[in-house]
Amino acid sequence: MSNDILFLAEFAGGKPARSALELATGAAELATQSGGSAVALAYGSGAADGATGLGAHGAARAVVLGDDDRPAITLAASVIAAVRDADALAVLAPATPNGRDLAAALVGTLHVPAFGPVRAARLADGVLETEQATLQGSAITTSRPADGAPSPSIVLVLANTFTPTEPGSGSAEVIQAPAAAESAFAKATVVESHEADAKVVNLEEATVIVAGGRGVGGEDGFGPLRELAGALGGAVGASRAAADAGWIPYQLQIGQTGKVVKPSLYIGAGISGAIQHRVGMQTAEHVIAINRDPDAPIGDFADLFVVGDLFQIIPALTDEIRRRTGSSKA
Amino acid sequence: MKIVVCIKQVPATSADKRYTDDLRLDRNGVEAIINPLDEYAIEQALRLVDDGSVENVTYLSMGPEQASEALRRALAMGGDDAVLITDPALAGADEWATAKVLAAALDKLAPDVALMGMASDDARGSLVPGAVAAMRDLPLLSYGSELAVADGAARVRRLSATGFDWITAPLPLVATVTDQVGEPRYASLKGIMAAKRKGLETWSLADLGLSADELSGAALTQVTDVRPPEAKPPTERIENLPPAEAATKIADWLDARKLI
């Protein structure tokens, strides 16, 4: 077994996803501990040109497996061949739908240990050790491969588990992808693609998110939230209730069945804070909740809980922020 | 056309959770429910029965004996019969072992579609469906907000980064659906009565031709520690202030943390 750490590097829209930079950093950290190298398995539009750039975040080598935006599972055979070829200690995968599909294909094909989604991964005495929040966050478990379990371990990694390093001067050496065997996974094909009605941003990349819930009351109610997000240089998100009501596209839903986000600032307006929403945003660095109900569950885990009418407070806050940031620029 | 819906019994969200000395969840006396995200898979299967494209729905679960309650509850919503895989050797099964057991059971049941929820409420790994597909060498259609079957193929509507795709694959296959398929139906009184007469078989590992050895005990992973989450600092509150004053206080709070 080599001591290399592989990671799945997703690209979209011609550039690496934030997860690719985070996992490059994490794989490089683990590789330093194991005495091996960080190796990217890159796919998605932009991977062919961009893979070498992952070297700036610590990847020594990169294998390009695909260069378009089709569902990653159709590349499973290539990923499996590359992982077999590399004989590594661990494979890090982003805890996204595509990352989970590929991780699952690896676990089921190679019969290797699966971990995650983890919020920490390290080597302890040369053995992989991971930390995971289980049972709706009621416990933190630490896990390892069982004695004698085969390698590599497949590790699903939550967003923001690793913080991307400042880009350095390194570049990853692009190596040829090994030939893939035939696979049933390749039988899935996209027959139609539709663009969303409105242009949607990728919430996973946002550093400030202003999210609205049932309390926003309707499509128009998101207007003041957009103004505030604009003043803060952030994006608008939503709870499942708001997405289900059709007030905002599902691509902007945060929570268990939507996006998992970790902005530096999350402002939740008219969101009660059900566990299903909480798991999508609980690792935000700063959480502000604005809600009329002084007993809303979100008050239990927000850093700052503002009890009041969001339709009065948010416009006032937007004005105040514009005044302060405007005057600081003058 | 036959669908097998795989479901998992999980502790209720509100239940108090404790761990046993060997670091497993203590399921004794803990209120248990059908994993909420599996109810959407059940609903999707039953909708395909309603519109005539599926004739038979079987439920499959792996778990302790009390997981038969989850199967009865599913049968009360609709469907035909159920299978519970239970075996003392499966205590502490991880995702790989779970997938191996479900794959063996699905080989026996041979459905056109093995349908699952997008995640379980307790562990959230979401790896079992894809691992089952790999073990059975079948296509995977995952994260569908809608599933349709016709002409020897299935297709799902799946969110993409910028919109959505329709993805198709030939039967048989493994599929997962999200909570966008529609609200799960309630079990009617009639449904609950009817469920009592529906078939519920119990299979052991031996019935599947599997041994504990082949399952590496029941896991390729081991839990070495369980602890409570870190305590959070107390929440600061702003209450009973006019909007402009509240806004000033929030801006001060943001300023102090260099967020504006």
Image: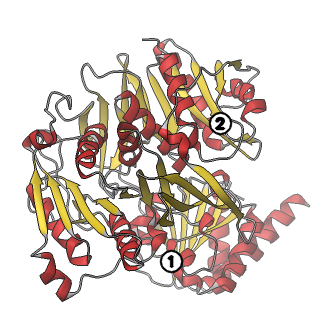
Q: Quadrant of the N terminus of chain A?
A: top left
Pick the front one: A166 or B246: A166
Mark 2, Cα crowd under 10 Å, few <14 / some 14-19 / many 20+, is many
- Identify the amino acid type marked 1: Ala
Mark 1, Cα crowd under 10 Å, few <14 / some 14-19 / many 20+, is some
Horizontal side of A294 relative to B186 (left or right) equals right
Horizontal and vertical percent for residue A301?
43, 64
Whether labels 2 and 1 share one chain: yes
User: What subunit carries mark 2?
Assistant: A
Q: Mark 2 or mark 1, which is nearer to you?
A: 2
Horizontal side of A267 relative to A67 (left or right) equals left
> What colouring method underlies this structural image?
secondary structure
Q: Quadrant of residue B213?
A: top left
Element type at mark 2: strand
Residue where numbered disc 2 is placed: A43
User: What subunit carries mark 1?
Assistant: A
Horizontal and vertical percent for residue B149?
47, 64
Q: Quadrant of residue B16?
A: bottom left
Pick the front one: A132 or B103: B103
In the rendered structure, find residue A241 and report the number of the disc placed on it.
1
